[in-house]
Amino acid sequence: MSKSAFNQTDTNGLIQRINKLTPATQPQWGKMNVAQMLAHCNVTYELVYDNKHPKPGAFKRFLLKAFVKNAVVGDKPYKRNSPTAPVFLVSDRQDFEKEKQRLISYINKTQQLGAGHFEGKESHSFGPLSAREWDTMFYKHLDHHLTQFGV
């Protein structure tokens, strides 16, 4: 993967794309509106920084590591309309500006902490990940959803 969630130029590019979104921006596929998409993207960071989501049990973590991890942390892009984990489902009304600012703040925090902070860091669902796996997961997920909304 060439772009990085730990590279300031690349994260500035992500933020520029986010800033092109408006509350009226329509998806090219999927069921979420733009505010829901931003809230959905924030869940990735909530799982890292905020203790607000329960951790999956041992058996579920085993299944996630066995069947989901490579799709999430690997280089292969997500397919359109891919299913998502229940914790990532956002169906209620969201505040566009609030979710947008939260996402930009999380992106900046992650970039400033850098790859070293994430090397071997425990993932909520997959156990310890390398900095490269974290990087791929962060960047690929954002890129997928920003593309979904045409930015």
Image: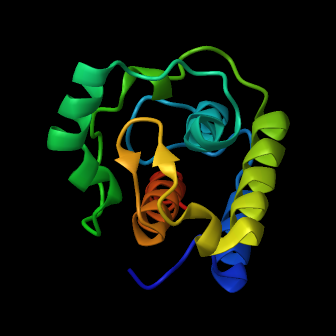
Which is nearer the eye, 102 or 123? 123
Across and down, in percent, residue 91 comes to 53, 17
* Left or right placement of residue 122 versus residue 63 in this view: right
Which is nearer the eye, 94 or 23? 94
* Left or right placement of residue 150 versus residue 74 in this view: right
Across and down, in percent, residue 8 comes to 72, 80
Q: In the rendered image of this protein, does residue 64 appear above or below residue 103?
A: above
Location of the N terminus (image quadrant): bottom left
Judging from the image, the colouring scheme is: rainbow
Which is nearer the eye, 81 or 27? 81
* Left or right placement of residue 98 versus residue 6 in this view: right
**What residue is at 79 percent from the left and 27 percent from the top?**
95
**What residue is at 73 percent from the left and 66 percent from the top?**
113
Location of the C terminus (image quadrant): bottom right
Q: Is residue 16 visible?
A: no
**What residue is at 54 percent from the left and 22 percent from the top?**
90
